[in-house]
Image (tube, rainbow, N blue to C red):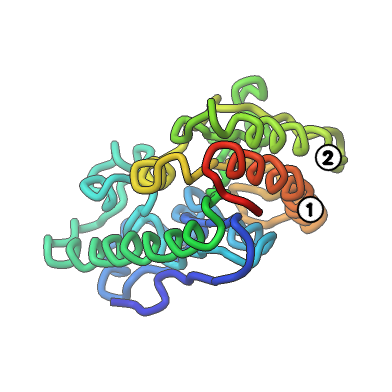
Amino acid sequence: MPIDSYNFYSGEGPVVAVSLHSGHDVRSELAPLFNLSDSERLREEDPYTDIFTAIVPARIVVRQSRFEVDLNRERSLAVYRTPEDAWGLNVWKEKPDEELVERSLAIYDRFYADAKVFLSSVICKYGYVVVYDIHSYNHMREGPYAKPANPAANPDVNLGTANLNRDLWGHVVDGLSKDLRTYHYPGGPLTVGENIRFRGGHYSHWIQQEFGDRSCAIAVEFKKIFMNEWTHDHDPVKLNALYNALICTLPGVLIHSNEVAEMHMGVLR
């Protein structure tokens, strides 16, 4: 089992930033079985989202590709077996046998066990945890020169909040959304939607199930406006702007989160 499939970085503060799909690594015993090229895999991965996690000291960065094991899906679906599991892509030349699959799922099991310890330690120290579950998504699926997907249904930033108690954490979500919309992004304000393209995946669902209302896990999905999703080249100005936009959300998130903790959890900051 690779020892560097993911990294946990401890640091001060109740906000944890996570990139589950930034990784591109696969185990050497699986690599010959893939039917997809590196470029095809990269198109469905979330490159550069690991950079965004550096907005806070406490962060989780996954190195293993989602095409080996997808940590944002239920365990039974974490290894893509059919094209229907993977956007219609034929992932494998030859399907891995169950022994190989189990070695991939061992990474899954170890990750969730380590995540439980890591997030529990944050809650123990601060009384709660806010998770920025950072992803990116494609909007040029018809080809590199085709018309982009409808902007109305594909906001620059989609906040997935279906896996949190919005009655409790609503001010945190609303403040985050407002701060992103009012940030001076190059070329005009960011469009921000909630639960439009994505509602949040298994990881944020697991956090809610595991830690209840002492957790606020928000799936932050950036449309790939900062990169070319076909060549994978990025625009450093736009990438840096999104990084700074996330940083600008932190003061408000901390204020509103501390209010929730003091009013509803008896946590005194």
- To which quarter of the image does residue 236 belong? bottom right
Q: Is residue 188 visible?
A: yes
Q: Quadrant of the C terminus?
A: bottom right
Provide residue 120's location: percent of width, then percent of height: 42, 60
Crowding around mark 1 (Cα neighbors within 10 Å: few <14, some 14 to 19, many 20+) is some
- To which quarter of the image does residue 141 belong? top right
- In the depicted structure, whether residue 160 falls above or below residue 48: above
Q: Nearer the viewer, residue 35 or 184?
A: 184
User: Which residue occupies 34% across, 42% down?
Assistant: 209
- In the depicted structure, whether residue 9 falls above or below residue 255: below
Q: Are marks 1 and 2 in contact (CB under 8 Å)?
A: yes
Tell me the tag on residue 86: none
Q: Amino acid at mark 2?
A: Tyr
What whole-number distance in Å separates the C-alpha atoms at marks 1 and 2?
A: 9 Å
The residue to which callout 2 is attached is 183
Q: Nearer the viewer, residue 172 or 227?
A: 172
Q: Is residue 144 visible?
A: no
User: Which residue occupies 83% across, 40% down?
Assistant: 183
Provide residue 75's location: percent of width, then percent of height: 25, 50
Q: Quadrant of the N terminus?
A: bottom left
Q: Is residue 239 left or right of residue 140?
A: right
Element class at badge 1 = helix
Element class at badge 2 = loop
The residue to which callout 1 is attached is 244
User: Which residue occupies 54% across, 71% down?
Assistant: 9
Q: Is residue 59 left or right of residue 36?
A: right
